[in-house]
Amino acid sequence: MLGTALCCGAVQAMACTGLSLTARDGSYVQARTIEAAAGALKSEYVIIPRGQEITSFTPTGINGLMFTANFGVVGMSVVMKEFICEGVNEAGLSAGLFFFPEYGQYQEYSPSHNDETLGDLQVPTWILTQFASIDEVKEAIGNVRIVGLDRNSVVHYRIGEPSGRQVVLEIVDGEPHFYENTVGVLTNAPGFQWHVTNLNNYVNLFPGAAPDRKLGDVTLKPIGGNSGFLGLPGDATPPSRFVRIAFYRATAPQLATGHETVLQCFHILNNFDIPIGIEHPAGEVPDIPSATQWTSAIDLTHRMVYYKTAYDNSIRCIDLSTIDFDKVKYQSCPMDEVKEQPIQYIVIK
């Protein structure tokens, strides 16, 4: 079952753009897109109660690390409900995975170490059910062996706290590396440090309009608005998306509340919707509305999960404070009950 789910290509085709913003009232929001160009992801929201017993997948089955949920969790999964790729727990700790091909490399799988083996696509679930802080994750990471569930798929991770602290976890040559993420954004490969260094290539960019300047006897003037951002890369590659989201974040005005900031994140990430047609040769495009299959925003301060999908752009919300994690059952439900965009028709009288 696991091999069939992963070999469908949905996981391998994943790409993502991550953003974080802090409101004036201190509310901290982490948002992201998730892309899959091979076909529709089986995306669900997942509720994990306290005390839930979980066994990790390994490349040979459901026979890996066993752990019990210390915290209730709300997450969003892809392909299978066990693979939470973004979520938050009762303590406000958030974790998500981002595709990281070619650059990451896990430890080699060894069946003799199954009792400490954790599948890469279940790392967010392990983090969210076990820990309340980034430091706790860093202390415990050496106790598990993270292995790939699909040899063609590698991911890295974003972990955040309500304080606004955020780290990126990358596993290279089998070793975990944590990077403090003060830029507040994330995409895919290459590595996080490379992306931060690459920002130096865009030191000339600034918000607003460029001033007039003389070129010999000719006066050069901006054509249209936003000329200070002339040269901002507009393609959908991870390096270009990283630069673009970093500058959008840096120039975003700070809003008053977490609610306003959540909506601001959705507006900014609208710029990162990837049309499905650019992902495939002509005539080979799958029947999905967008390569960007859903967008989420999590208010870590108030423990509220918001999302919208390519099928329904209406924003939906799950408030963790309304869930009794001692009584609720482990469950998952499709993000879209009906894959259809609701339209409000205006009646003119």
Image: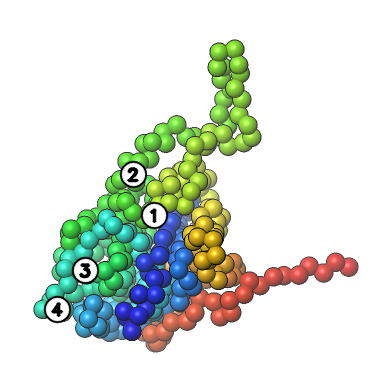
Give, as a three-letter code, the residue at label 2: Val
Residue type at the position of mark 3: Ile
Using the rendered view, name the quadrant where residue 302 is placed: bottom left
Asked if the residues shown at circle 3 and circle 4 are in contact, with their CB atoms under 8 angstroms apart, the answer is no
Viewer-proximal residue, 36 or 50? 36
At 35% from the left and 41% from the top, the residue drawn is 198
Counting from the top left corner in percent of width and height, residue 288 is at 54, 70
What is the number of the mark on residue 146? 3
Q: Where is residue 64 in the image (x, y as percent from the top left)?
A: 21, 80
**Along the line of sight, which residue is nearer the eye, 325 or 87?**
87
**What amino acid is at disc 4?**
Pro
| Residue identifier under label 2 | 196
**Marks 1 and 2 close (CB-CB < 8 Å):** no
Q: Residue 111 carries which label?
A: 4
Q: Could you tell me how far apart the alpha carbons at marks 2 and 4 are, in whole angstroms?
A: 38 Å
Task: Count neighbours of disc 1 (C-alpha within 10 A) and say few if under 14, some if 14 to 19, many if 20 or more.
Answer: many
Which image quadrant for residue 78?
Answer: bottom left
